[in-house]
Amino acid sequence: FIGSGQFALSKTPNSEKAFFLFQLFMAATSATIMSGAIAGRASIDVYYVCVVGISGFIFPVVTHWAWSEQGWLSPFAEPKDRVGHNTDDDICGYIDFAGSGCVHITGGMAALMGAWLIGPRTGRFEVPEAFEQSNQALIAIGVLILWFGWFGFNAGSTLDLLGDIAAKAAVTTTLSPCAAGLTALLYTRLLRNKWEIGQMLNCVLAGLVSITAGCPFVSDWASIIIGIAGALVYLVASRCIELARIDDPVNAIAIHGVCGIWGCLAVGIFGIKEDIQAFYSKCPNAKGNSTGMQFAIQLLGVVVIISWTVVMMGIILCTCKFLFGTLRITVEEEQYGMDQTEHMDESNHGRDGSSHGRKPPAKHYESNSSMKILNLTKPKDPERVSRPLSNLHTRFSKAEESSQPVLVQPSSKNDGGVHLANTPGEETKGGGGKSNSTNRQEMEQMSTEFDMKQIPKPRGIDVSQDGKVQPNGLPSSTLTL
């Protein structure tokens, strides 16, 4: 069922350790898929437990079934030991060349369970515009890095980068994502009258996941069809997941889970028997897509992987809920940012004795009469008073009584400084309003010191004490206190 022997590399010859290293990174990939789906609200303690569970138990069992010489689904097993031998001795077992099922369905279903049980980020579906993609350039860089690594993922699964099968895998690994990306661009252009780069990049990944299972076994033209279909599968799945109010910040469930399912089934539709026979020595009479039996075996493998992963992840997450009391961080920690509350070093920020040694988030000052804002826009008046940003301490006690917000803006000088801007409705000079010097004097008289290090990250939303979520109406460059 789960295999035995060679635990912790015991009695493993050196000749097999390169293969172990390759599988190690397969396991790591499966575990990291989940991280994006639960980002921004899951407790880091819970994620650590999930990583151990996925990479140490869930993934190894799946790969034993599908890739081991003793696996009951495996094409590497003897015909009498694998599924399908009672109906047709020529059935080659479940074919998943580089892991559309073993890696991506496993990671995608783990992501689904995590996102569902942990719940959405605060305000995700109440104020969706506050959670839109913010940096297309970084997304594009990430996708290009993944695409480059995918050649090692797919072609490298032959364990022979100079072979004909590896060359075939590399070509289809290029064609499928290209077709998927172009499909997304045309789709968004025709339906939304926009060339949406974010959707195109996600569809490139969808095409890569879709071709992973059968990259050396399908023809070049079939890889293009698989990529196009993978893009459409992703677009539909992503929308359905959103309608189900499951919060997946990076669309890991749709890209890896759902497109992984399509990739496995595509082998039963487009798999060429001659190519399958050439790679699997124990499948000399494989029939590929010439009968429907291979598709049935692929479907069985998909159902088994989904069932195993969902059940085991449910057990792991429920156990974490029992042990830790919760699966997620607090609303205040969400707004303050997990970089500070989960990761910052004690020597730099100190601790107050609170649970997990986390520094409590800054107080969110909210008032019906005023909202204190740091408006990080370039000033228009170069004569305004500036001071170094690192030494700035803003005092808010008097501002609490004012009906106008206090604005602090960067200096126009290239010195990293800021200046104290006029409040809205006041003229700079000659308009009856207060001058810059007056504003500065008022700020200097305020008695409550506020350290700049306590400024939370912008999220585009405010959460009141009663838990009500509402947009703060601020552009992405402003920070609400």
Image (cartoon, grey):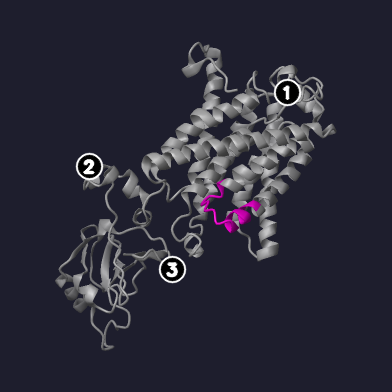
Q: How crowded is mark 1: few (under 14 residues within 10 Å), some or many (20 or more)?
A: some
Q: Nearer the viewer, residue 209 or 351?
A: 351
- Residue 35 position within the rendered picture, expressed as x and y whole percent measured from the top left: 48, 43
Report the span colored magenta. Answer: 237-252
- Residue for badge 1: 279
Q: Is residue 353 magenta?
A: no
Q: Look at the numbered disc 3 and give the secondary structure of its residue.
A: strand
Q: Nearer the viewer, residue 409 or 83?
A: 83
- Residue 100 position within the rendered picture, expressed as x and y whole percent measured from the top left: 64, 36
- Residue 93 position within the rendered picture, expressed as x and y whole percent measured from the top left: 73, 26
Residue 399 appears left or right of 178: left
Q: Look at the numbered disc 1 and give the secondary structure of its residue.
A: helix
Amino acid residing under circle 2: Ser
- Residue for badge 2: 347
Using the rendered image of the protein, determine whether residue 161 is visible from the camera's viewpoint: no
Q: Does the magenta stretch include residue 247?
A: yes
Residue 129 appears left or right of 188: left
Q: Which quadrant: the C terminus?
A: bottom left
At x 32% / y 49%, what residue is drawn?
340
C-alpha gap between disc 1 and disc 3: 56 Å
- Residue for badge 3: 471
Task: Give residue 361's mark.
Answer: none
At x 67% / y 31%, what residue is drawn?
96
Q: How crowded is mark 3: few (under 14 residues within 10 Å), some or many (20 or more)?
A: some
Judged from this view, the residue extending furthest toward the front is 322
From the viewer's perspective, is residue 297 above or below residue 119?
A: above
Choose top left, top right, bottom left or bottom right for residue 43: top left
Label 1 or label 3, whichever lies nearer to me, is 3
Counting residues from the N terminus, which is met first, the one under dot 1 or under dot 2? 1
Amino acid residing under circle 3: Pro
